[in-house]
Image (spheres, rainbow, N blue to C red):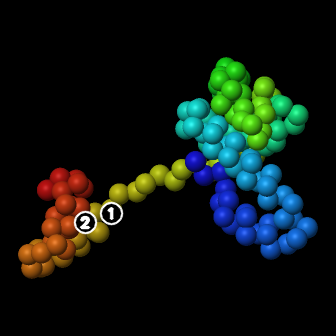
Amino acid sequence: MRPFSLLRVRGLLQAEPQFAVALPEAERLFGLNRRFAGIVPAAVARACRIASVQADVAVIYCANGAAASRVRAQAKGVASVLNQPDTPVNSIKVKIRADWSLPPIPEKHDIPVAGLNAFKALETSLPEGELKDALERLLSRRHGR
């Protein structure tokens, strides 16, 4: 899960005394989102965030209706996992907000043909050793050999 870089947020909040009071809440929400991500499917975890806990109700923003429906269907289980002594949660409230999700995971691109050819040429010119073995393994996983 990558809701935000807590270390970076912690540093920013600690830098300014008037913002430092927000640090415990940021850490609490980070922990809640981490527990939430552990019980819902990965796609739902990427599309939803726990925004706050008001009284004993966790407010969860979801980027789309499908994710919101999934969270609503698991509402009792989600609430029971989120319920901790430091943050009592007895129910959840789901709201749809299209701007409340993580960006999609970038697609991995394979090595272009020109790059593979360059690695093959390098591999043939190298003496026996660890580097040559590593290049052989790399090339064997790409487009066969």
Extreme left residue here?
128
Rendering coords of residue 144 (x, y %): 17, 53
Rendering coords of residue 143 (x, y %): 22, 53
Q: Is residue 39 visible?
A: yes
Residue 93 sits in quarter:
top right
Extreme right residue here?
18
Circle 1 packing at 10 Å, graded few (<14), some (14-19), many (20+), is: few
User: For the residue labelled by badge 2, is the local secondary structure a helix, a strand or a loop?
Assistant: helix
Left or right for 141, reference 28? left
In the displayed structure, 135 sits above or below 67; it is below
Residue at the spot of label 1: 112
Give the position of the C terminus as an image quadrant: bottom left
Residue 75 sits in quarter:
top right
Q: Amino acid at mark 2?
A: Leu
In the displayed structure, 7 sits above or below 36; it is below
The foreground one among 62 and 145 is: 62
Label 2, label 1: how far apart the Cα atoms are? 6 Å
Q: Is residue 62 visible?
A: no
User: For the residue labelled by badge 1, is the local secondary structure a helix, a strand or a loop?
Assistant: loop
Residue at the spot of label 2: 116
In the displayed structure, 76 sits above or below 67; it is above
Left or right for 2, reference 131? right
Rendering coords of residue 60 (x, y %): 76, 36
Rendering coords of residue 65 (x, y %): 71, 28
Marks 2 and 1 in Cβ contact (< 8 Å): yes
The foreground one among 8 and 95 is: 8
Point 80% across, 66% down: residue: 13
Residue 138 sits in quarter:
bottom left
Circle 2 packing at 10 Å, graded few (<14), some (14-19), many (20+), is: some
Q: Amino acid at mark 1?
A: Pro
Point 15% across, 67% down: residue: 133
